[in-house]
Image (cartoon, rainbow, N blue to C red):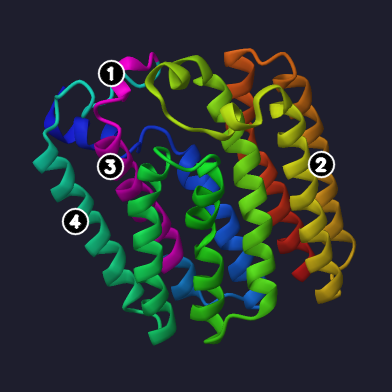
Amino acid sequence: MSKLALYMKLMRLDKPIGSLLLLWPTLWGLWVASSGHPRPELLIVFFLGTILMRSAGCVVNDYADMDYDPHVERTRNRPLASRRVTKKEALLLAAILSIAAFCLVLLTNRLTIMLSFVALFLAASYPFTKRFFAIPQAYLGIAFGFGIPMAFAAQTGTIPGIAWQILIANIFWTVAYDTEYAMVDREDDIKIGIRTSALTFGRYDVLAVMLCYAIMIALLASVGTELGRGLYYYSGLAAAVIIMLYHYFLIRGRERNSCFKAFLHNNWVGGAVFLGILLDYL
Protein backbone atom coordinates (compact mmCIF):
# COMPACT_ATOMS: atom_id res chain seq x y z
CA MET A 1 0.00 0.00 0.00
CA SER A 2 1.36 3.43 -0.99
CA LYS A 3 2.08 6.15 1.57
CA LEU A 4 -0.75 8.27 0.20
CA ALA A 5 -3.19 5.39 0.66
CA LEU A 6 -1.92 4.88 4.21
CA TYR A 7 -2.35 8.58 5.00
CA MET A 8 -5.92 8.48 3.65
CA LYS A 9 -6.62 5.42 5.79
CA LEU A 10 -5.11 7.16 8.81
CA MET A 11 -7.45 10.10 8.16
CA ARG A 12 -10.39 7.63 7.90
CA LEU A 13 -11.37 8.98 4.50
CA ASP A 14 -12.50 5.44 3.73
CA LYS A 15 -14.96 5.63 6.63
CA PRO A 16 -17.10 8.79 6.28
CA ILE A 17 -19.42 8.01 9.22
CA GLY A 18 -17.30 10.09 11.62
CA SER A 19 -17.42 13.13 9.34
CA LEU A 20 -21.19 12.79 9.00
CA LEU A 21 -21.71 12.53 12.77
CA LEU A 22 -19.64 15.70 13.09
CA LEU A 23 -21.36 17.46 10.19
CA TRP A 24 -25.02 16.95 11.15
CA PRO A 25 -24.98 18.92 14.43
CA THR A 26 -22.92 21.65 12.74
CA LEU A 27 -25.62 21.95 10.09
CA TRP A 28 -28.33 22.01 12.78
CA GLY A 29 -26.57 24.98 14.34
CA LEU A 30 -25.93 26.76 11.06
CA TRP A 31 -29.56 26.45 9.93
CA VAL A 32 -31.03 27.55 13.25
CA ALA A 33 -28.55 30.43 13.55
CA SER A 34 -29.46 31.70 10.08
CA SER A 35 -33.22 31.00 10.36
CA GLY A 36 -32.87 28.60 7.44
CA HIS A 37 -30.77 30.83 5.20
CA PRO A 38 -27.06 30.19 5.90
CA ARG A 39 -24.55 32.18 3.92
CA PRO A 40 -23.17 30.02 1.06
CA GLU A 41 -19.54 30.76 1.96
CA LEU A 42 -20.16 29.55 5.52
CA LEU A 43 -21.60 26.30 4.22
CA ILE A 44 -18.37 25.71 2.30
CA VAL A 45 -16.17 26.70 5.26
CA PHE A 46 -17.96 24.43 7.73
CA PHE A 47 -18.32 21.51 5.32
CA LEU A 48 -14.62 21.45 4.43
CA GLY A 49 -13.59 22.36 7.98
CA THR A 50 -15.55 19.43 9.37
CA ILE A 51 -13.77 16.97 7.08
CA LEU A 52 -10.34 18.44 7.83
CA MET A 53 -10.78 18.53 11.61
CA ARG A 54 -12.29 15.07 11.75
CA SER A 55 -9.33 13.79 9.74
CA ALA A 56 -6.88 15.56 12.05
CA GLY A 57 -8.70 14.17 15.08
CA CYS A 58 -8.43 10.63 13.71
CA VAL A 59 -4.68 11.03 13.22
CA VAL A 60 -4.23 12.31 16.78
CA ASN A 61 -6.47 9.54 18.12
CA ASP A 62 -4.38 6.85 16.42
CA TYR A 63 -1.19 8.52 17.63
CA ALA A 64 -2.47 8.44 21.21
CA ASP A 65 -3.64 4.82 20.88
CA MET A 66 -0.79 3.38 18.81
CA ASP A 67 0.40 1.20 21.71
CA TYR A 68 -3.16 0.04 22.49
CA ASP A 69 -4.58 -0.54 19.01
CA PRO A 70 -2.38 -3.58 18.21
CA HIS A 71 -4.17 -5.44 21.04
CA VAL A 72 -7.68 -4.71 19.71
CA GLU A 73 -9.00 -6.92 16.91
CA ARG A 74 -10.79 -4.09 15.10
CA THR A 75 -7.86 -1.64 15.17
CA ARG A 76 -4.69 -3.74 14.96
CA ASN A 77 -4.21 -3.07 11.24
CA ARG A 78 -4.42 0.72 11.44
CA PRO A 79 -1.39 2.42 9.83
CA LEU A 80 0.17 3.63 13.10
CA ALA A 81 -0.65 0.47 15.04
CA SER A 82 1.02 -1.64 12.36
CA ARG A 83 3.93 0.84 12.20
CA ARG A 84 3.48 1.44 8.47
CA VAL A 85 3.30 5.18 9.26
CA THR A 86 5.78 6.77 11.65
CA LYS A 87 5.01 9.06 14.59
CA LYS A 88 6.71 11.96 12.83
CA GLU A 89 4.64 11.46 9.68
CA ALA A 90 1.43 11.32 11.72
CA LEU A 91 2.17 14.51 13.66
CA LEU A 92 3.11 16.35 10.47
CA LEU A 93 -0.10 15.21 8.78
CA ALA A 94 -2.20 16.32 11.77
CA ALA A 95 -0.46 19.72 11.74
CA ILE A 96 -1.09 20.22 8.00
CA LEU A 97 -4.77 19.32 8.36
CA SER A 98 -5.20 21.65 11.35
CA ILE A 99 -3.49 24.55 9.56
CA ALA A 100 -5.71 24.03 6.51
CA ALA A 101 -8.81 24.09 8.74
CA PHE A 102 -7.57 27.25 10.46
CA CYS A 103 -7.10 28.94 7.07
CA LEU A 104 -10.78 28.32 6.42
CA VAL A 105 -11.76 29.81 9.79
CA LEU A 106 -9.83 32.96 8.89
CA LEU A 107 -12.58 33.62 6.33
CA THR A 108 -15.11 34.12 9.17
CA ASN A 109 -14.98 36.59 12.08
CA ARG A 110 -12.94 37.20 15.22
CA LEU A 111 -15.25 35.31 17.60
CA THR A 112 -15.26 32.22 15.38
CA ILE A 113 -11.47 32.37 15.08
CA MET A 114 -11.15 32.50 18.88
CA LEU A 115 -13.51 29.54 19.24
CA SER A 116 -11.43 27.57 16.72
CA PHE A 117 -8.57 27.39 19.23
CA VAL A 118 -10.93 25.80 21.76
CA ALA A 119 -12.13 23.37 19.07
CA LEU A 120 -8.54 22.43 18.27
CA PHE A 121 -7.74 21.79 21.93
CA LEU A 122 -10.84 19.61 22.32
CA ALA A 123 -10.01 17.56 19.22
CA ALA A 124 -6.37 17.09 20.24
CA SER A 125 -7.06 16.26 23.89
CA TYR A 126 -10.02 13.91 23.52
CA PRO A 127 -7.99 10.74 22.73
CA PHE A 128 -6.14 11.08 26.04
CA THR A 129 -9.33 11.34 28.14
CA LYS A 130 -9.85 7.60 27.69
CA ARG A 131 -7.05 7.11 30.21
CA PHE A 132 -8.82 8.75 33.16
CA PHE A 133 -12.43 9.86 32.35
CA ALA A 134 -15.16 7.39 33.27
CA ILE A 135 -17.29 8.59 30.35
CA PRO A 136 -14.90 10.05 27.74
CA GLN A 137 -17.80 9.99 25.26
CA ALA A 138 -19.20 13.10 26.98
CA TYR A 139 -15.96 14.94 26.22
CA LEU A 140 -16.20 13.68 22.64
CA GLY A 141 -19.71 15.12 22.49
CA ILE A 142 -18.35 18.57 23.30
CA ALA A 143 -15.61 18.17 20.69
CA PHE A 144 -18.00 16.84 18.03
CA GLY A 145 -20.59 19.50 18.81
CA PHE A 146 -18.36 22.53 19.04
CA GLY A 147 -19.22 23.36 15.46
CA ILE A 148 -22.62 24.44 16.82
CA PRO A 149 -21.47 27.54 18.78
CA MET A 150 -18.93 28.21 16.01
CA ALA A 151 -21.75 28.19 13.44
CA PHE A 152 -23.77 30.68 15.49
CA ALA A 153 -20.68 32.85 15.96
CA ALA A 154 -19.89 32.82 12.25
CA GLN A 155 -23.46 33.50 11.16
CA THR A 156 -24.57 36.02 13.81
CA GLY A 157 -21.45 37.16 15.67
CA THR A 158 -22.97 35.96 18.96
CA ILE A 159 -23.61 32.69 20.81
CA PRO A 160 -27.14 32.71 22.29
CA GLY A 161 -28.36 30.28 24.91
CA ILE A 162 -30.12 28.19 22.27
CA ALA A 163 -26.73 27.29 20.79
CA TRP A 164 -25.54 25.81 24.07
CA GLN A 165 -28.80 23.91 24.43
CA ILE A 166 -28.27 22.30 21.02
CA LEU A 167 -24.69 21.51 22.04
CA ILE A 168 -25.88 19.76 25.21
CA ALA A 169 -28.36 17.75 23.12
CA ASN A 170 -25.46 16.71 20.92
CA ILE A 171 -23.43 15.62 23.96
CA PHE A 172 -26.18 13.20 25.00
CA TRP A 173 -26.51 11.95 21.41
CA THR A 174 -22.76 11.35 21.24
CA VAL A 175 -22.73 9.45 24.53
CA ALA A 176 -25.54 7.27 23.11
CA TYR A 177 -23.97 6.38 19.79
CA ASP A 178 -20.40 6.14 21.03
CA THR A 179 -21.53 3.83 23.84
CA GLU A 180 -22.91 1.58 21.10
CA TYR A 181 -19.49 1.80 19.47
CA ALA A 182 -17.75 1.04 22.77
CA MET A 183 -19.95 -2.01 23.29
CA VAL A 184 -18.22 -3.53 20.28
CA ASP A 185 -14.79 -3.34 21.93
CA ARG A 186 -15.86 -4.02 25.52
CA GLU A 187 -13.71 -7.12 26.08
CA ASP A 188 -10.63 -5.62 24.42
CA ASP A 189 -10.99 -2.38 26.42
CA ILE A 190 -11.12 -4.33 29.68
CA LYS A 191 -7.94 -6.16 28.72
CA ILE A 192 -5.92 -3.06 27.83
CA GLY A 193 -7.31 -0.76 30.54
CA ILE A 194 -9.12 1.83 28.40
CA ARG A 195 -12.08 3.58 30.03
CA THR A 196 -15.35 3.85 28.12
CA SER A 197 -18.99 4.57 28.87
CA ALA A 198 -19.89 0.96 28.00
CA LEU A 199 -17.71 -0.22 30.89
CA THR A 200 -18.87 2.53 33.25
CA PHE A 201 -22.57 1.84 32.60
CA GLY A 202 -21.97 -1.91 32.90
CA ARG A 203 -25.16 -3.97 32.71
CA TYR A 204 -27.16 -0.75 32.39
CA ASP A 205 -25.49 0.15 29.09
CA VAL A 206 -28.57 -0.37 26.93
CA LEU A 207 -30.73 1.61 29.36
CA ALA A 208 -28.15 4.42 29.40
CA VAL A 209 -28.09 4.60 25.61
CA MET A 210 -31.87 4.90 25.41
CA LEU A 211 -31.99 7.48 28.22
CA CYS A 212 -29.38 9.59 26.43
CA TYR A 213 -31.42 9.37 23.24
CA ALA A 214 -34.52 10.47 25.16
CA ILE A 215 -32.76 13.45 26.74
CA MET A 216 -31.39 14.51 23.35
CA ILE A 217 -34.87 14.47 21.81
CA ALA A 218 -36.37 16.31 24.80
CA LEU A 219 -33.75 19.07 24.54
CA LEU A 220 -34.24 19.46 20.79
CA ALA A 221 -38.03 19.53 21.29
CA SER A 222 -37.49 22.31 23.83
CA VAL A 223 -35.40 24.17 21.27
CA GLY A 224 -38.24 23.83 18.77
CA THR A 225 -40.74 25.20 21.27
CA GLU A 226 -38.51 28.15 22.12
CA LEU A 227 -38.03 28.94 18.41
CA GLY A 228 -41.69 28.44 17.57
CA ARG A 229 -40.99 25.73 15.03
CA GLY A 230 -43.74 23.74 13.34
CA LEU A 231 -44.86 20.34 12.11
CA TYR A 232 -41.84 19.51 9.96
CA TYR A 233 -39.39 20.17 12.77
CA TYR A 234 -41.18 17.81 15.13
CA SER A 235 -41.69 15.26 12.36
CA GLY A 236 -37.90 15.13 12.00
CA LEU A 237 -37.60 14.45 15.72
CA ALA A 238 -40.32 11.78 15.49
CA ALA A 239 -38.44 10.07 12.65
CA ALA A 240 -35.29 10.13 14.77
CA VAL A 241 -37.19 8.50 17.65
CA ILE A 242 -38.35 5.67 15.38
CA ILE A 243 -34.75 5.07 14.31
CA MET A 244 -33.63 5.08 17.94
CA LEU A 245 -36.24 2.47 18.83
CA TYR A 246 -34.82 0.30 16.06
CA HIS A 247 -31.42 0.72 17.68
CA TYR A 248 -32.80 -0.72 20.90
CA PHE A 249 -33.60 -3.96 19.14
CA LEU A 250 -30.11 -4.00 17.64
CA ILE A 251 -28.18 -3.44 20.87
CA ARG A 252 -30.31 -5.25 23.47
CA GLY A 253 -28.47 -8.53 22.81
CA ARG A 254 -25.08 -6.75 23.00
CA GLU A 255 -23.79 -8.60 19.96
CA ARG A 256 -20.76 -6.91 18.41
CA ASN A 257 -22.00 -6.72 14.83
CA SER A 258 -25.44 -5.45 15.84
CA CYS A 259 -23.98 -2.79 18.15
CA PHE A 260 -21.68 -1.60 15.40
CA LYS A 261 -24.59 -1.51 12.97
CA ALA A 262 -26.53 0.66 15.43
CA PHE A 263 -23.56 3.02 15.73
CA LEU A 264 -23.30 3.42 11.95
CA HIS A 265 -27.07 3.89 11.73
CA ASN A 266 -26.85 7.10 13.78
CA ASN A 267 -26.08 8.89 10.54
CA TRP A 268 -29.81 8.57 9.83
CA VAL A 269 -30.67 10.04 13.25
CA GLY A 270 -28.65 13.16 12.54
CA GLY A 271 -29.99 13.33 9.00
CA ALA A 272 -33.61 13.01 10.13
CA VAL A 273 -33.22 15.87 12.61
CA PHE A 274 -31.57 18.05 9.97
CA LEU A 275 -34.20 17.25 7.34
CA GLY A 276 -36.91 18.31 9.79
CA ILE A 277 -35.10 21.60 10.47
CA LEU A 278 -34.50 22.19 6.75
CA LEU A 279 -38.12 21.55 5.72
CA ASP A 280 -39.56 23.55 8.60
CA TYR A 281 -37.58 26.64 7.69
CA LEU A 282 -38.48 26.19 4.01
User: Which is more N-terminal, label 1 or label 4?
Assistant: 1
Q: Is residue 128 visible?
A: yes
Q: Nearer the viewer, mark 3 or mark 4?
A: 3
Q: Residue at x 78, y 28 (%)?
A: 246
Vertical arrangement, residue 199 with respect to residue 21, above or below: above
Q: CA distance from mark 2 to mark 4?
A: 39 Å
Instruction: Name the kind of residue labelled 1 in the image.
Output: Pro
Name the residue that disc number 3 marks: 59
**Is 34 or 182 nearer to us in this picture?**
182
Q: Nearer the viewer, mark 1 or mark 3?
A: 1
Per the rendering, the mark at residue 70 is 1
- Magenta region, residue range: 45-73
Instruction: Name the kind of residue labelled 3 in the image.
Output: Val
Looking at the rendering, in which quadrant would you find the C terminus? bottom right
Name the residue that disc number 4 marks: 96
x then y, percent, for residue 192: 38, 21
